[in-house]
Image (spheres, rainbow, N blue to C red):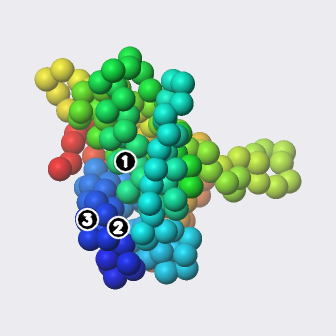
Amino acid sequence: MFGACNVPAAEAALAASILVRSELRGYRTHGMTRVASYVERLRAGDFNPRAVMSHQSIPGGIVLEADGAMGQIAGPRAIELGLEALRTDASVLIAVRESGHLGALGIYALLAAEAGVFCVLGQRTTPMLSMEGFARAAIGHNPIAFGCPMRGAAPLVFDIACSVAARGHILLAAREGKPIPPAGRWTSTARRPLTQSAH
C-alpha cells in the first residue's frame, strides 16, 4: 500500500514492518490501525514519499532532517545514527526535524535496547488536550518512551502518552465500531507484557 503511494520498496517494507511489529507488541492503536490514515497523508502530501534525509553533527548530538519522511522511516534512521555515534561517544542526543507521525515510540526504544544501549525518546506534539480549568487545548499527547537492555532477558520497554488515551485509541474504536470508554476506563487487554519482544 505504501509502495502504491510512491514510497520506495525498501522504505515501504521498513514502514510496514514497524507497524506490524507495533501491532504484535500490543500497540494496536499505533499498528495496522494507522495504515489508512498514513496512506491518506501520503496522498495528500502531508508525508513525503520520496524524502531525502540528511543529518548534521553538532556538539553533543545529531540533527536529522527527515524531509517529511514517514516516522516509521525516520525513527529507525535516528536510532541507526545514534548507534553509529555511540561507537565513539558515551552518549548522543538526536533531534529529528520534519518527520511524519512516529507512531509508538516504544518500538524505536526497543530497537536501541536490542542493540545493547539504553535509549530515551520524547516527542513534542501539537496541543490537542485541555487541562482542568483551561478553556482550550493546552498540551499535546507528548509521548515518552525508554528501552533498556536486560542481561539474559528481553529488553525492558516503557512507553506512555501524557493523556488519558492516545488518539490511536479513538481511531481503533472507530475501526472496530466500538464506543469510546469513559475517562479513566482505558485499558488494553490485548497488550503483551512490555518485557516480551515480538519479532
Mark 2 element type: helix
Q: Earlier in the sequence, mark 3 or mark 2?
A: 3
Q: Is residue 163 left or right of residue 100?
A: right
Q: Where, by quadrant of the figure, is residue 87 drawn?
A: top left
Q: Which residue is mark 2?
A: 32
Comparing 131 with 125, the one in front is 125
Q: Residue at x 37, y 39 (%)?
A: 81
Q: Depth check: give the residue in front, 71 or 132.
A: 71
Can you tell which quarter of the image residue 8 is in? bottom left
Distance of mark 3 from mark 2, alpha carbons? Answer: 18 Å
Quadrant hosting residue 45: bottom right
List the residue tagged with mark 3: 10
| Residue name at image x 49 percent, y 81 percent | 43
Which percent across, then down, holds residue 155? 25, 31
Q: Name the amino acid, label 3.
A: Ala
- Check disc 1 and give the amino acid type: Arg
Alpha carbon distance from label 1 to label 3: 13 Å
**Element carrying mark 1:** helix
Q: Which residue is mark 1?
A: 77
Q: Quadrant of the N terminus?
A: bottom left
Q: Amino acid at mark 2?
A: Met
Which class describes the residues within 10 Å of circle 1: few (<14), some (14-19), or many (20+)? Answer: some
Q: CA distance from mark 2 to mark 1?
A: 21 Å
In the displayed structure, 107 sits above or below 153; it is: below
